[in-house]
Image (spheres, coloured by chain):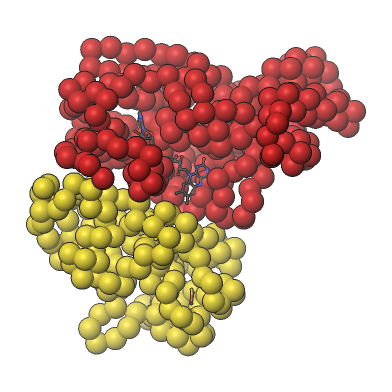
Amino acid sequence: MKKIKLTVNKKEYMLEIKEDTRLIDLLRDVLGFTGVKEGCGEGECGACTVIMDGDIVNSCLVLAFQADGKEIITIEGVESEEEIHPIQQAFLDVGAVQCGFCTPGMILSAKALLDKNPSPTREEIRAAISGNLCRCTGYNKIVDAIERAALYLKRGK
Amino acid sequence: MGIREVYKGRNIDEVLELLDKYRNDCRIIAGGTDLVVHLRHKRLNPKVLVDISDIEELHGIKKEGEFIEIKGATTFTEIVKSNLVNKQLIGLKEAAKSVGSPQIRNRGTIGGNICNGSPAADIVPPLLALDSTVLLKSKNKEREISLEELFLDKGKVNLKENELLYSVKFKKINKNQVLSFSKLGLRKALAISRLCISVFLELDKSKECKRVKIADGALGKHGVRERKVEEFLLGKRLNEETIEEGAIILQEEISHRLQGRLSLPFKKEAVKGVFKSAISKALENLH
Ligand SMILES: Cc1cc2nc3c(=O)[nH]c(=O)nc-3n(C[C@H](O)[C@H](O)[C@H](O)COP(=O)(O)OP(=O)(O)OC[C@H]3O[C@@H](n4cnc5c(N)ncnc54)[C@H](O)[C@@H]3O)c2cc1C
Ligand code: FES
Ligand code: FES
């Protein structure tokens, strides 16, 4: 067993983990953040995307011990208790959610983009979500939603 | 997975000490974007893992006299963002940008790309075309060899069990030189490249090739320098005819190298377009 300390959604955890635990297993099975989805388990689909120290990563390819000392944000850390996040609102308003499997990862990729670049072009949005596969929507609606989310976020300020 | 011990390396000395102690039982993990997939498929079965992804000394790109040095655990995202990877080095930036997805580029490293030894490692051809060397460190030793010498076979690199790839170095590129990159992927965003070519080019006053170095990926057991094509182009002007003839020589080389492979007919056809695109990108970016 290995002792690690990390912050998930602003809360600090001290944990003992098995050496070969992946970050996705730690987040889902140990800490209960089931908004992190496992699709391919090999870095191809992006369903397991989380934000680690400000950048998106595939949590299926990070071993949990590597995340020692890191700050992680999952979809659960994006919404507050009272209301959903403007990006989530935009996804609902535009109809960018169908089965919803890709949505948490998509929203985190969108958030990492908008945190750094509040007015992205459609091309920049497409590049930012190019590691997130969606079998349902054909992506246009998702790009629309992220464009709209950028407006919501600016208005909110 | 039979992993018994994991270490989050804090500095180089500690890592070299661990590598020396555990030897063959031990593996370095950087971004994990190759290694974790290998573990999942049980292609590798290390007992000890040493993480180098957060060692500051192993990150970054800097000028060292007349050289540029890229540290071993520098990520593709860091390469794309670096100011030192400028317009002349566009091929290095484009290669880094072409890798996987944003998530993969945020974690995947230059050292991992090289040491994994995949024939399709995208950062390798630009580095070969730059005549790069690699600095390898172990507990009481360091050695510097050419990147080309590092590749032994498919998936096999000339790295001792206690060695760490510390950095990659190449000569700074002049205003009248350029490095280009062109890649053919099967899917737009996500595809281990099936074919890529990088060209280093310098023309003299009469527009003849003064220096030309060409390397490709996924057209052999590892990244390969195409010396026959280089020799042919040297001292010639690049026009439709010479480029076409260069492409034909490249096709011949590949036919020879990939003899009997199912992918040969496709690659032989495709390589022509990728070669021409790499050459024209080089010419575009020279002024
Ligand atoms: C979905 C997906 C898409 C991908 N797309 C591409 C692509 O388009 N192009 C491409 O080239 N690759 C691609 N890859 C492969 C991979 O991302 C790259 O090869 C990456 O550079 C590996 O780096 P890493 O730091 O993640 O290596 P790791 O997985 O951490 O390590 C790989 C190997 O190198 C060794 N190693 C790592 N660093 C060092 C070091 N400094 N010294 C000595 N040994 C070391 C490790 O022990 C291990 O054997 C893709 C992978 C995935 C999962
Ligand atoms: S589950 Fe991690 S990328 Fe698909
Ligand atoms: S909404 Fe179903 S996968 Fe994207």
**Which residue is depicted at the point 55% across and 45% down?**
B192
Vertically, is A2 above or below B163? below
Of A147 and B141, which appears nearest the observer? B141
Q: How many marks?
A: 0
Residue found at x 44% / y 50%: B104
Ligand 2, image quadrant it occupies: bottom left
Residue that sits furthest to the front in the current view? B260
Name the quadrant containing residue B200.
Answer: top right
Residue A46 image offset from top left, x and y in percent: 43, 62
User: What shade does chain A have?
Assistant: yellow
Q: Position of residue B228 (x, y in %)?
A: 74, 17
Quadrant of the rendered image containing residue B111: top left
Residue A5 placement, left or right of A57: left
The residue drawn where x is 47% and y is 30% is: B155
The colour one sees for chain B in the rendered image is red
Residue drawn 41% across and 84% down? Answer: A89
